[in-house]
């Protein structure tokens, strides 16, 4: 009586039985009608129905086989390699095509795109866009064509996808999460019916699926006759331009998608409403790319050490103590900052004159990604501090880059030195294969391997920093502002993380406890969700914050050896609450300093951002920074850029 | 066979009723999605899971250690076989061994991220597709996922958390009498396992029969429409994302009804199910009291219950 008996393989949940998610379904159908409109990427939280849509769509397409790329895929299986077994058996060099080659003329599915290693994602997307596979490995150098369709899904909270990769997808659909009671009930009902008797369930929807398929095929047949007027081309171009998208892939997807929509509705010509409808499916995921680029573009000119001063944000003006030492050369910097941001669509929702609602939607979706105050200005650099950072202290960053012993296996390499562990046997066999006819076999073995054949597993892990913010959320005067600055800073830094693979977490301490409010993440989505409301107020249990930070990073090291941890402590140093119940300020402070000891001993690099304000300064933060062996920096301008820039400088 | 006979009997485990119930429900209905057991060390988590396998014939516990490598988890090319015979052979990994059984991951929150990735991928479809290191292979991998974690040592990724159908929070036994009972039984068992096991043979058989009956009854359990509505409104009121929780809630309530020998799902089943299905899916706001969640849950159930009564 195995549990298995109850879990036999069931037929696929029918596409037309999926409740809601109309936009996703529409995008998939239009893509099937006109593959020239680009692939489909669905993004949604767990249980939103990503897998259901993908499998249902694949079954609907029918005429093509679907080939899945699992999260465990390695480069040899993706791109193709010599067939190790055939070599051993028949001593013939047979090339075993990879998944991308098998997918030629078929449909490629990736259920969890962002769980794949980045190198793998890049290979998939490159082959998809160009229709060819470039093979340069193990002595093979070949280019073969492979044209496949691509459906992918991801959970944005698991980490983002770099924008250049996103751009390769024609349609990017964020799945709906908020459904009405009736549709939720219907979803449950159908799922239960399906599980109780899958065959009967599938049968019930067969006619609907078939009708969809026929309409789809009919539309595909009429597609070549669908006309696109010059004014429509112009409209597409102007919408893409106003959305601030440089890539011409957006316009192509817009036009081809609109043609499919017209074909579906049995119209001979593309209308402006087609274009507007498709814009909602093909632009938003590219617009987050715009935010990325404008940030990168803005970042570079400010990177060299310069005397540039920041512009004043409205918050700065109201704060009495933002003592900008030198206000005059201000205007150049803030001017250039504004220029970039005004061209960014988020700052000017009214730019989309054609359809206000659409513009609103686009800017709303972007709000989550772009910074709350979208000025990408940079803080003045403390030159001395920066040099200090470069000299030492935080110099441990980067060490783990050489570490190949952990992480996900992505392929095999020829080892530089002696192979001690992680022999890639398949690659080794392939390497030894050509020599089998001339080598002498040892007793009982069908194959001869020599030391020179040995190949080592190539591993990829998320090497990058784990930045842990430890933030004072107690009820001091500046608490809210401090919190807002840190939140903005985190989101800003996570934008960089797209490129740098850094991950960020946050511990807040107040009112007797420290809480891990943002588990270390690479996802902008996750961060903005977790950081939405963090209460402030209460006393300052600084010690609790330090202890929690130490525990958290120790655990993080156990789980992810390659990570380069760093603590960023944002506080005015005025600890006044002790986890062990001490009451005198002197005792509380002493306890605080001793909590710093294990952090210092473990060699975790720290940065203390001092937010102390007012006339009477106790300078406690500086003392604590010394105890931590930390870099110390006074946070003059308490805003997001102040925070983000301080961290960027320190990380270098 | 011998060692199964000697396994510490499930029915001899003192207390921990929630954990035992959650495990039993998963045996009755393997599609519930497993159990996440949260609690400190030394709370008989492993013993209980192993004992469950001892209770149910042909149910194994496949252990996935935190240190497991990816190829051990998903499977790999059998190199020895390849070199000796020249034939390609897939060496199945833990995901193959766990098919139809319990996949047990102690301290699942310490699992490497990339292992979690492949696990999530396999769990999503119930199929393990291997495309790595010269191997292309696919096999069913439907398992009852049982994980344990000490919440003080860090959280689980939300995606993995969502995969667990049920979760239970366990603590050490507080009642002195019961604590003494735990020790007494343990000592008895260690002195003479054979005799100890024999002593519980009848209870074990009874429980197994109850499980089998519940399993037979499960398909006939009726789920009234207003219970579907209750499930959805609980999901909405508690702001639980996705539909997996709604569906798991209903399925758990139906399994509970079968376990209790009843033919129709009622609000009491829904309430009992909610305490197993929802706690790990609710996003706790920062600095919110842990008890706040329970209160909210209770509040929703009450108001939904009064709506039902009308």
Image (cartoon, helix red, strand yellow):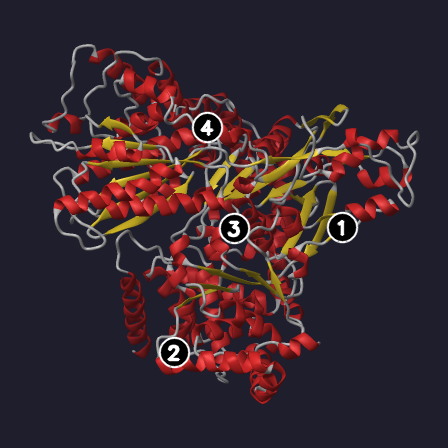
Along the polypeptide, which appears first: circle 1 or circle 2? 1
Relative to A180, does residue B137 appear above or below in the rendering?
above
- Give the residue number, with chain letter if any, for mark 1: B90
Can I make out residue A214 in this image? no
Relative to A544, does residue A468 appear above or below in the rendering?
above
Q: Chain under label 1? A: B
- Give the residue number, with chain letter if any, for mark 3: B111
> Marks 3 and 1, Cα distance to the nearest angstrom?
25 Å
Left or right: B174 in relation to B122: left
Residue at image point 50% right, 33% down: A463
Seen from the viewer's position, the closer of residues A358 and A522 is A522
Left or right: A354 in relation to A310: right
Left or right: A174 in relation to B195: left
Q: Chain under label 3? A: B
Counting other residues with Cα less than 10 Å from the Cα at mark 1, is it few (<14), some (14-19), or many (20 or more)? some
Relative to B36, does residue A45 appear above or below in the rendering?
above
Expressed as whole percent of the image width and height from the top left, the position of residue A126 reads 61, 28
């Amino acid at each position: 009586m195995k549990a298995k008996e109850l879990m036999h393989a069931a037929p696929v949940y029918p596409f037309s039985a999926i409740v809601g998610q109309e936009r996703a379904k529409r995008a998939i159908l239009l893509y099937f009608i006109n593959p020239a409109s680009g692939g489909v990427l669905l993004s949604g939280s767990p249980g939103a129905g990503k897998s259901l849509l993908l499998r249902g769509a694949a079954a609907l397409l029918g005429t093509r086989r679907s080939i899945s790329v699992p999260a465990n895929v390695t480069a040899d299986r993706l791109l193709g390699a010599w067939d190790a077994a055939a070599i051993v058996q028949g001593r013939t060099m047979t090339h075993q095509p990879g998944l991308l080659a098998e997918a030629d003329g078929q449909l490629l599915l990736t259920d969890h795109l962002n769980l794949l290693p980045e190198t793998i994602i890049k290979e998939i997307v490159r082959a998809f866009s160009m229709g060819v596979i470039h093979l340069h490995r193990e002595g093979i150098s070949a280019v073969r064509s492979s044209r496949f369709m691509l459906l992918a899904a991801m959970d944005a909270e698991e980490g983002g996808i770099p924008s250049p990769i996103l751009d390769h997808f024609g349609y990017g659909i964020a799945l709906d999460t908020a459904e009405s009671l009736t549709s939720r009930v219907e979803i449950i009902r159908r799922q239960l019916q399906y599980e109780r008797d899958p065959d009967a369930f599938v049968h019930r929807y067969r006619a609907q699926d078939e009708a969809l398929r026929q309409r789809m095929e009919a539309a595909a047949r009429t597609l070549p006759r669908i006309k696109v007027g010059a004014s429509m081309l112009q409209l597409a171009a102007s919408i893409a331009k106003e959305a601030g998208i440089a890539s011409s892939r957006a316009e192509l997807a817009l036009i081809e998608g609109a043609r499919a929509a017209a074909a579906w509705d049995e119209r001979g010509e593309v209308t402006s409403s087609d274009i507007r409808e498709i814009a909602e499916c093909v632009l938003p995921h590219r617009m987050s790319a715009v935010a990325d680029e404008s940030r990168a573009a803005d970042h570079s000119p400010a990177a060299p050490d310069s005397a540039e001063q920041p512009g004043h944000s409205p918050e700065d003006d109201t704060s009495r103590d933002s003592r900008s030492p030198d206000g005059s050369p201000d205007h150049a910097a803030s001017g250039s900052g504004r220029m970039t941001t005004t061209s960014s669509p988020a700052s000017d929702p009214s730019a989309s004159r054609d359809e206000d609602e659409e513009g609103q939607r686009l800017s709303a979706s972007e709000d989550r990604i772009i910074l709350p105050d979208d000025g990408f200005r940079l803080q003045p650099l403390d030159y001395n501090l920066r040099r200090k950072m470069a000299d030492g202290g935080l110099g441990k960053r980067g060490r783990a880059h050489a570490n190949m012993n952990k992480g996900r296996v992505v392929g095999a390499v020829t080892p530089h030195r002696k192979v001690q562990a992680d022999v890639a046997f398949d690659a080794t066999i392939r390497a030894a294969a050509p020599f089998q006819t001339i080598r002498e076999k040892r007793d009982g073995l069908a194959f001869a391997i020599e030391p020179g054949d040995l190949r080592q597993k190539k591993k990829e892990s998320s090497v990058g920093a784990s930045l842990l913010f430890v933030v004072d959320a107690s009820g001091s005067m500046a608490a809210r502002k401090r919190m807002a600055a840190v939140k903005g800073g985190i989101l800003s830094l996570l934008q960089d993380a797209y490129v740098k693979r850094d991950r960020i977490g946050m511990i807040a301490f107040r009112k007797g406890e420290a809480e891990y409010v943002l588990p270390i993440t690479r996802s902008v989505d996750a961060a903005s969700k977790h950081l939405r409301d963090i209460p402030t107020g209460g006393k300052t249990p600084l010690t609790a914050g330090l202890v929690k930070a130490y525990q958290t990073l120790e655990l993080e090291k156990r789980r992810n050896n390659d990570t380069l941890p760093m603590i960023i402590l944002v506080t005015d140093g005025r600890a006044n609450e002790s986890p062990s119940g001490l009451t005198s300020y002197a005792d509380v402070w002493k306890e605080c300093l001793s909590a710093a000891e294990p952090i210092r001993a473990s060699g975790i690099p720290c940065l203390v951002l001092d937010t102390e304000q007012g006339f009477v300064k106790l300078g406690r933060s500086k003392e604590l920074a010394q105890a931590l062996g930390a870099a110390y920096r006074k946070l003059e301008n308490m805003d997001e850029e102040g925070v983000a820039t301080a961290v960027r400088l320190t990380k270098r | 066979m011998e060692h199964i006979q000697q396994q510490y009997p499930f029915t001899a485990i003192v207390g921990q009723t929630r954990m035992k119930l959650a495990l039993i429900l998963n045996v009755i209905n393997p599609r519930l999605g497993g159990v996440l057991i949260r609690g400190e060390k030394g709370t008989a988590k492993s013993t209980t899971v192993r004992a469950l396998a001892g209770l149910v014939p042909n149910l194994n516990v496949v252990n996935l250690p935190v240190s497991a490598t990816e190829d051990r988890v998903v499977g790999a090319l059998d190199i020895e076989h390849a070199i000796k015979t020249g034939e390609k052979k897939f060496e199945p990994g833990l995901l193959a061994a766990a098919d139809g059984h319990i996949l047990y991951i102690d301290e699942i929150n310490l699992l490497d991220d990339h292992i979690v990735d492949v696990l999530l991928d396999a769990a999503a479809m119930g199929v393990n597709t291997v495309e790595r290191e010269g191997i292309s292979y696919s096999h069913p991998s439907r398992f009852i996922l049982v994980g344990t974690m000490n919440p003080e040592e860090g959280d689980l990724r939300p995606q993995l958390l969502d995969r667990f159908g049920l979760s239970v929070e366990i603590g050490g036994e507080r009642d002195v009498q019961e604590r003494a009972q735990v020790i007494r039984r343990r000592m008895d068992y260690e002195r003479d396992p054979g005799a100890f096991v024999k002593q519980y043979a009848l209870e074990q058989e009874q429980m197994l029969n109850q499980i089998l009956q519940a399993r037979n009854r499960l398909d006939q359990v009726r789920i009234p429409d207003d219970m579907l509505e209750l499930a959805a409104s609980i999901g909405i009121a508690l702001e639980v994302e996705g539909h997996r929780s709604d569906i798991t809630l209903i399925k758990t309530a139906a399994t509970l009804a079968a376990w209790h020998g009843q033919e129709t799902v009622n609000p009491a089943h829904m309430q009992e199910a909610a305490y197993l299905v929802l706690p790990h899916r609710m996003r706790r706001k920062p600095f919110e009291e842990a008890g706040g969640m329970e209160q909210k849950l209770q509040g929703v159930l009450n108001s939904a219950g009064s709506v039902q009564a009308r």
